Image: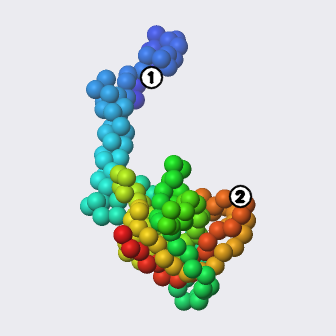
Amino acid sequence: MADPTPDERDQPYDRWSRPQALSNRGYAIAAVVPFVIAAIGFGIVALVSSGDGAGSGVTVRLPTSGWAPASGGGDALIQGVLRLDDQRCVYLEAGQDGADPGKVWAVWPAGYQATREGDRLTLLDSDGNVVAHDGDQISTSGGFGPAGTFAGEPCVPASGEVAIVQSEVTATP
């Protein structure tokens, strides 16, 4: 390689006037590509999470216990009309034959879920089978215990008693 001329040696190094690594079009593409990838990813997630409509809906806050069908249980009668309050909490409306209705807060067996599609509340068992809908009369057995036992569960009152569902739930519309 030839030795630099005296004029080339005396010129200071100018780090700001180097040629661009990419053209302006390359920089624009590099800026747009991450947004396109993110949009495609969000589209895929939305498509997968929408499902076919079965079992979709808004999840409802439902307190559950560790009780499972093989565990045995209490024999106190628990019954009422399945309802949903303004905070999306499921309760049983007790009181029949003209009596004032009262709210019975129930703690459901492990794996139970509730969803709401429009105005329709659906109670599902641990296998995902429909047990009841809003307005159905529920009948089950179990026991009653202090609400404090289930502290941390959603929709459990701070004090008083809750109904602990410990059997199969039957419903009549």
| Above or below: residue 69 compared with residue 121 | below
The image quarter in which residue 72 lies: bottom right
Q: In this rendering, would 33 be left or right of 65?
A: left
Can residue 112 be seen here? yes
| Above or below: residue 124 compared with residue 42 | below
Residue 131, position as x, y percentages in the image: 40, 73
Q: Residue at 47% across / 60% down in the picture?
A: 83
For marks 1 and 2 on the same chain, the one whose residue lies earlier in the sequence: 1
The image quarter in which residue 5 lies: top left
The image quarter in which residue 19 lies: top left
Residue wearing tag 1 = 3
- Secondary structure, mark 1, is loop
Q: In this rendering, would 11 be left or right of 41?
A: right
Mark 1 to mark 2: distance in Å?
88 Å
Can residue 22 be seen here? no
Residue 35, position as x, y percentages in the image: 35, 37
Q: Residue at 61% across / 74% down in the picture?
A: 164
Residue wearing tag 2 = 158
Q: How crowded is mark 2: few (under 14 residues within 10 Å), some or many (20 or more)?
A: few
Q: Residue at 46% across / 72% down in the picture?
A: 138
Instruction: From the image, state whether disc 1 or disc 2 is nearer to you.
Output: 2
The foreground one among 98 and 36 is: 98
| Above or below: residue 70 compared with residue 20 | below
Q: Residue at 69% across / 67% down in the picture?
A: 161
Under mark 1, the amino acid is Asp
Q: In this rendering, would 141 be left or right of 162?
A: left
Q: In which quarter of the image is the C terminus?
A: bottom left
- Secondary structure, mark 2, is loop
Residue 66, position as x, y percentages in the image: 60, 77
Residue 136, position as x, y percentages in the image: 41, 67
